[in-house]
Amino acid sequence: MKALVIAPQPFFSPRGTPFSVYYRTLILSEQGVQIDFLTYGQGQDVDIPGVRFIRTPAFRFLGPVKIGPSPFKLFLDCFIFWQMVWLLCTRRYDFVHAHEEAVFFALLLKPLFRFKLVYDMHSSLAQQMRNFNFSRSALLIGLFKRLEDASLKAADAVITICPDLRDYVNSIISEPAKHFLIENSLFMPVRLRQATTGNSGPGSDQDAGQVARELKRQGHPLIVYAGTLEHYQGIDLLLEAMALVGQSLPQARCLVVGGSPAQVARYREKARQSALEGQVIFTGQMPQHLARQASGQADILVSPRSEGTNTPLKIYEQLASGIPLVATAIYSHTQVLTDEVAFLADPRPEALAEALLNALREPELARGKAAAARALYAARYAEAAYRGKIANLLHWLR
């Protein structure tokens, strides 16, 4: 089969949707699909056999492409659209795999080019407009909702990433057989064409793995968060909780791996103002292997997410790690996590601090939860299960 994959993101970059797109594309290719991959000009090149990458102009002088809707993304999407038209005019595809807002272009062009459409729905685009404060216009948000609903109905197959989105989609479509829940549960190393060999990433001044090893050598109980520093990730909540942890367990340390230079600077200053400068350490963005080295040294992994309903990608890797996990008890987490596999806490500083202290002070209980988490991952989310879900999708499309 031949497919056109359209990914309107800076691909590859170390954040949620590009990771998801990478693993989808990798497994499709390994199952014999020949792929043309259309994406933005910004991003790192990756090596996936059987995939030809086509990039729009990067416009780097306009700055980086930020997470969420933005005028810059709308500008770049114009180039995605016209390149998509050219590819459809000059090549024949068995299906178009449209990620995020690219589905709107596919919806428009589907009657003309008669391709099968796969809508990979990483989130509700109408909801994103509210979450990222892109627009408060009820008219504009309503338009996006109608386009989204039309895309779901017109698609030959729909992929969602978590139970919350699954339930949302099932309330709209009339043919549930075309709907595939494929969680973002893979985390093997990304094959960068020019692999990062240094000890740091953009905005970082420390090797996260080395920092973690040194903290452990000094005998500090170590809590690690690895991920982006967007507001919904709950880093403010984590800082407040760590202030309380420090009152009861002053030797505890929290290592925060990830974030843009501006985000890291802002949170370092907040930590300084809260007298947490030595207790919470920010490394900035790291290459994938260094972030994993840091996580591997942890006594406790934490996901303090404060908003949202989509399950974070990091949760699946945390489940498989064999390291005890503390997470906030919001639906973003609880649609996958239970008290059997994690220490769950209300998204309040006092509750999160208590959960962190319990995880550190009750090692036998923590080990039991970690073992149950690993078993859950192996049973429901491991690579074999993921490959089987992609195979089912391809069987449906044939």
Image (spheres, rainbow, N blue to C red):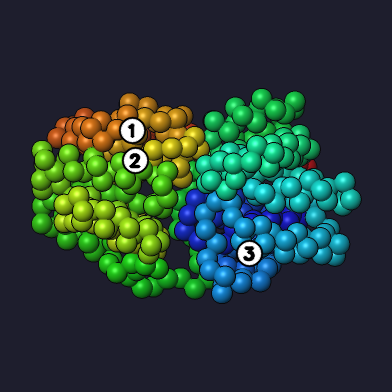
Q: Are marks 2 and 3 in contact (CB under 8 Å)?
A: no
Q: Are marks 1 and 3 in contact (CB under 8 Å)?
A: no
* Element type at mark 2: loop
Q: Amino acid at mark 1?
A: Pro
In three-dimensional space, the C-alpha distance between marks 2 and 1, rounded to whole angstroms, equals: 7 Å
Q: Amino acid at mark 3?
A: Tyr
| Residue for point 31% across, 45% down | 236
How many marks the image carries: the answer is 3
Q: Which residue is mark 2?
A: 304
| Residue for point 47% across, 58% down | 14
Q: Quadrant location of residue 87?
A: bottom right
**Dot 2: within a 10 Å radius of its alpha carbon, few (fewer than 14), some, or many (20 or more) residues?**
many
Q: Are marks 2 and 1 in contact (CB under 8 Å)?
A: yes
Residue 86 place in picture, x, y as percent? 82, 64
Residue 230 place in picture, x, y as percent? 42, 50
Q: Which residue is mark 3?
A: 40
In three-dimensional space, the C-alpha distance between marks 1 and 3, rounded to whole angstroms, equals: 36 Å
Depicted 78 relative to depicted 276: above or below: below
Which sits in the foreground, 275 or 55?
A: 275
**Dot 1: within a 10 Å radius of its alpha carbon, few (fewer than 14), some, or many (20 or more) residues?**
many
Extreme-right residue of the structure: 112
Q: Quadrant of the C terminus?
A: top right
Closer to us: mark 1 or mark 3?
Answer: 1
Which sits in the foreground, 358 or 309?
A: 309
Q: Which residue is mark 1?
A: 347
| Residue for point 76% across, 34% down | 153
* Element type at mark 3: loop
317 relative to 122 in the view: left or right? left
Quick one: label 2 or label 1, which is nearer the N terminus? 2
